[in-house]
Amino acid sequence: MKPLWLSLLLIATLGITACSEAPPQVHKAKLFTLGTLVDVSVHHLDKASAQQAVKIIEDELAIINRQWHAWQDGPLMQINQQLAQGKTITIDSSSHHFLQQAQRLAANSDQLFNPTIGSLVEQWGFHSDDRPDAAPPTKKRINAARKQMPSMANITLTATTLTSNNPAVQFDFGAFGKGYAIDRAVEQLKQAGIKDAIVNAGGDLRAIGSKGDRPWRIGVRHPSEAGVIASIETDGDESVFTSGNYERFFDFDGRRYHHIIDPRSGYPANDAISVTVIHNNAATADAAATALFIAGTTQWPQIAKQMGIDEVMLIDNDLTIYMSAKMAQRIQIEIDDAQIKIIDDER
Amino acid sequence: MTRADYYIVLFAALLLPYLYISQWTGDKAGISATIMNGNETTEVSLAHDHTLEIDGALGTSTIKIENGKIRFTASPCLGKQCIHSGWLEHAGEFAACLPNRISVAVLGEAPRFDSINF
């Protein structure tokens, strides 16, 4: 009889070898659209089908981009001009759906997600693909814009019309349009029979299905250093969105100013450096990540609850990680010595 | 134990650490990178130090490869966020100069993640 250790050694060798199957085939493509870089991964398809999927995504994202771009000449610019003139605007069913969803999310966020502060965002210089390191707006200008207090509550929607009772309303759907576009693209993919894919637009993504026999693995980038701070395995159909102060910013006189403007103060929100949200709907995740970033370390649990978000990770300026209990159950922290505070959802 | 058994055991013993390292350790340094300019993609090796100058939509971006890492060192954009992204080393890491429509992504044999959220 052969020694027991010999048998164990051979079994261990065979076990490791059996685990090392050839990697499943994932087709990847990158596109410049929506003002960002879109990364598409499609699993389990032949190359022609994958290329068709990429084309579907490209076409759908281009439609949303053209319709709702805040500072390129197009339909939204015309809507903003008409709103400033107090006119009633005729809208189609897709615009109604888009605006209705944005209005509901804004109300649930106590207007912290506020897509009507386009004038303020423009004054900060973020209505540009490439903002230079020039001076921020003066306090006087910010206060003047803030006092007009536009919000989605000023908007009245019918199935075919849009009106505003505040001429200061100027739409900028930067915290919603990308999520909405991803949702539309994913629905088109599903209708085309594609079950396993990731659509990642500038770091925000929706993943459907899986990578063969395992879930998609998502790394969440560290907000202030190289590498990832956490990782998540998606389950079925989920969106992972992060709002961070490192995404768009400019430096002036030794200070950094980022693009997430608190509608209450008129200045960049400064209580968090990043917020990550998981939700099955990308548009909701997009709006919630912005609203919770603005809500900050004390207010985010309440706003998350109102918005129906139960998986949240907020990182503050000291790199303390705040998490909802449900997020803590599934996220893997990838750094050493992390300071973590788990917030009870039911408090 | 016969001589043949001895060789099998020796082979298995040598194979185990190799298989463990090659199959179970992740987050490897990248071995090459793709540079996307508009819709054209080029693959470059990270094995040799060199500097690339690439003409994009706005002007010329400079990309440096050094010690197995890659980064933007100059770009005609105003915000310079591509340069702020710093060195990229691990499979899956990437940086982009959106105004110049140039991006860099590190490739590798076994990236730990299928996609990066930020």
Image: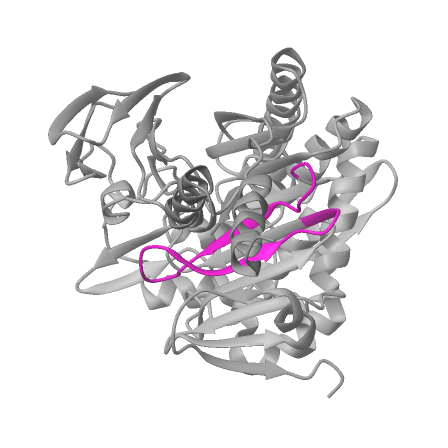
In screen coordinates, is B31 left or right of A3? Answer: left
- Residue at 32 percent across and 38 percent down: it is B30
Q: Can you name the residue that lies furthest to the bottom here?
A: A347
Q: Quadrant of residue A222?
A: bottom left
Image quadrant containing the C terminus of chain A? bottom right
Q: How is the image coloured?
A: one colour
Residue A270: x and y in percent read 41, 72
Horizontal and vertical percent position of residue A27: 56, 24
Q: In this view, does A67 lie above or below A282?
A: above
Percent coordinates x, y for residue A81 in the rendering: 58, 37
Residue placed most toward the observer, A185 or B9: B9
Q: Which residue lies furthest to the top in this view?
A: A48
- Tell me which residue sits at (45%, 64%) in the image: A334
Residue A330 drawn above or below residue A203: below
Q: Residue furthest right?
A: A159
Along the line of sight, which residue is nearer the eye, A149 or B1?
A: B1
Left or right: residue A200 versus residue A136 is right
- Which stretch is magenta? A211-238
In the visual, does B55 lie left or right of B33? left
Magenta span includes A150: no
Count of marks, rendered view: 0
**Residue A223 is a magenta residue:** yes
Answer whether residue B90 is visible to the viewer in this image: yes
Asked whether residue B27 appears in the rendered view, the answer is no
A164, above or below B51, in the image = below
Q: Residue at x 45, y 59 (%)?
A: A244
The image shows residue A159 at horizontal and vertical percentages of 88, 39
Closer to the camera in the image, A251 or B34? B34
Q: Which quarter of the picture shows residue A44?
A: top right
Q: Residue at x 83, y 33 (%)?
A: A93
